Amino acid sequence: MTRLLLSLLILSACTDSATKDSSSGVDSGVGADSGADDSDAAVDNDGDGSPEGEDCDDADPTTYPGAAELCDGKDNSCDGAIDEGVQSSFYADGDGDGYGAGDPLLACEAPSGAVAQDGDCDDADPRYNPGAAETDCADPNDYNCDGSVGYADGDGDGFAACQECDDGDATVNPTAIEVCDGRDNDCDGATDGSDATDATTFYADSDGDGYGDVDFPVLDCAQPEGYASVSTDCDDGADAVNPGAAEVCDTIDNDCDGLIDDADDSVDLTTGGTFYADNDGDGFGDADAPTLACALPASGAAENDADCDDGDGAVNPDASEVCDELDNDCDGLIDDADDSVDLSTGETFYGDSDGDGYGDSDELITACALPSGAAVVDGDCDDGAGTTYPGATDACDGEDNNCDGLIDEDSTLGLQLVSVEMVGSSGTVYAIDAGTASYTALATLSSATAVGFNSATYDSASGRTIAHDYTNAKLWEMDVCDGTMSEIGATGVGNTCGIVFGPGGLLYGLDTSSDSLVTLDPATGAATLVGSLGIALGSCGLAYDCASDTLIGVDSAGAQLFYVDATTGAATTKLPLGISFGSVGVEYNPVDGMLYIMNGSQLYMANPATGSSTLVGAVGFSGSRDDLSFVPECAP
């Protein structure tokens, strides 16, 4: 205020001096010729560059609009806020140990009872703070607030480093069980040894023949010198006597089998040998019944082991082969066509290379009985394919599987085309006539298991029908005949709008969130990205042309069909369908080679090679229905 009064006095003095001496006709004032009116000049009392009318405190040069905020209890920047952005955080220090806790207090200076350092884990006890020391090995308190107990336990096994022998391994501590691993597990100062729970029993082997004495066992993790792992030596003082030794005619049980020379003491025991039981007396012994003796027994034994049936004297290497379903001459073949066999009563068979039970008409075999690699009947049109033979199901593979001259005619035999109607949380399975679009209800999905259903597919290999839950991003196994559903698992790609078993037996789907092809694990539901389609999807469906091993997609956004590379996910050969789409469901029929497309309430048939489509008819049931699948027919 003093500065303001002084300025006004100076201004008044200047004005008065400028009007004096009017008699002379000359204005002697300093500004007489300037033409300026000094009464309009802005006043800046504190000299901070902001005039009085703009400065919120024109007596303080540190306070003016735009000034830097200082932590001084003033609104330095004239923005209506005091000390904003320049205050410091302080924390209540209840126990006076220099460390605070709780929410921060903002101030320019530390309030009473507060400090700048926080982190106190017990602000009522000065022993606890981040700067406290922990030295007592047996003290379990966390004095320094670092989240660990009061002593070092590097491996978290409950024992301090000072209490155990290896604080870097939780399996090593004073309460651990000693095992054979080259370590002192229980910290008793001994490594492995007889107290190891998995120690092995070894036996004293005084004669070093590899066989120990059962009467002298020892427990250890490794085989000690002078010990063996087996205890079957019957004389541990003679290295030539053990279970692995050969029995010789020396009146000793050399092989520890409880028999001496395998004969009584009256036999001359220096010319022993191996002989074989000859129960049928044909002079040929049984290889499975050897006997050691010092000489050939008087009866019931032979020097050779060539008999293949020691219960039939007519069967031996010297016998002639005949058609009697026996290996008469012991050559390993039954009724084989060698020179000694009379095949006049034999049969004609046919070579069956693929083992499907049907032989090649051009490969004749005459034998007493059906040989390996042959069949009783002929008519196989491809003896190199085990799935091709008369009467086989003609699967969708571009081959004449049943040898009737037709290809793939049985691909949908025993199958029905189905769709699911969803109304709210309830669903109904319908069978649809692909020729007329007429339908029949098969089963009702209960509200407890009904899902945001949008596609299904049948796996002929496993006999399972897999359904996709668009709303909850899950796979289900579904029984279309009774409506039961079993959850398989989450896919992680909730926008998958079409699934089908395709190339390689994999389960494929179209993910509209990333416009990509994915594979789904039918056991867990988990999805794996194959690759981008290169097109923007709307509502979509996916089918599999099994004859050409091709994935075919249908997309409502482009009203088109396209082929999908199963290895890269790229969409190619896009063909317009001429259909105004809503929702989409699609299935391939290998018999007529056509796609069947469910579009809202309309069933269409489309040519996958040209994209041309024909309306089959309206499907009269209401609700959401954007799926189609060929599945096995329900039993009546």
Image (cartoon, rainbow, N blue to C red):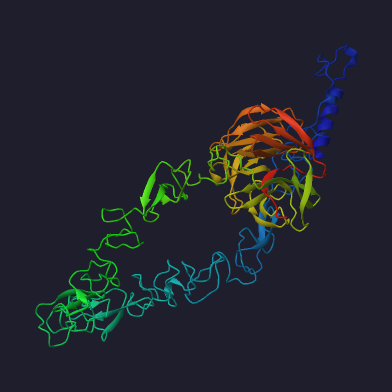
Residue 455 sits in quarter: top right
* Viewer-nearest residue: 278 or 455: 278
Residue at the right extreme? 23
Q: Is residue 543 visible?
A: yes
* Viewer-nearest residue: 395 or 248: 395
Q: In this view, does 461 lie to the left or right of 243?
A: right
* Viewer-nearest residue: 90 or 356: 356
Query: Eyeballing the image, is 227 above or below 429?
Result: below
* Viewer-nearest residue: 476 or 72: 476
Q: Can residue 494 be seen in this view?
A: no
Q: Where is residue 7 in the image (x, y as percent from the top left)?
A: 81, 32
Q: Where is residue 378 in the image (x, y as percent from the top left)?
A: 46, 46
Residue at the front extreme? 344
Query: Eyeballing the image, is 220 above or below 71?
Result: below
Q: State the count of labels.
A: 0
Q: Is residue 42 left or right of residue 171?
A: right
At horizontal 31% and vertical 62% (from top left) the residue drawn is 327
- The quadrant the N terminus occupies is top right
Q: Where is residue 3 in the image (x, y as percent from the top left)?
A: 79, 37
- The quadrant the C terminus occupies is bottom right
Q: Where is residue 269 in the image (x, y as percent from the top left)?
A: 11, 82
Query: Eyeballing the image, is 3 above or below 355?
Result: above
Q: Is residue 612 left or right of residue 36?
A: left
At horizontal 25% and vertical 69% (from top left) the residue drawn is 287
Residue 241 sits in quarter: bottom left
Query: Eyeballing the image, is 217 above or below 557?
Result: below
At horizontal 61% and vertical 51% (from top left) the residue drawn is 525
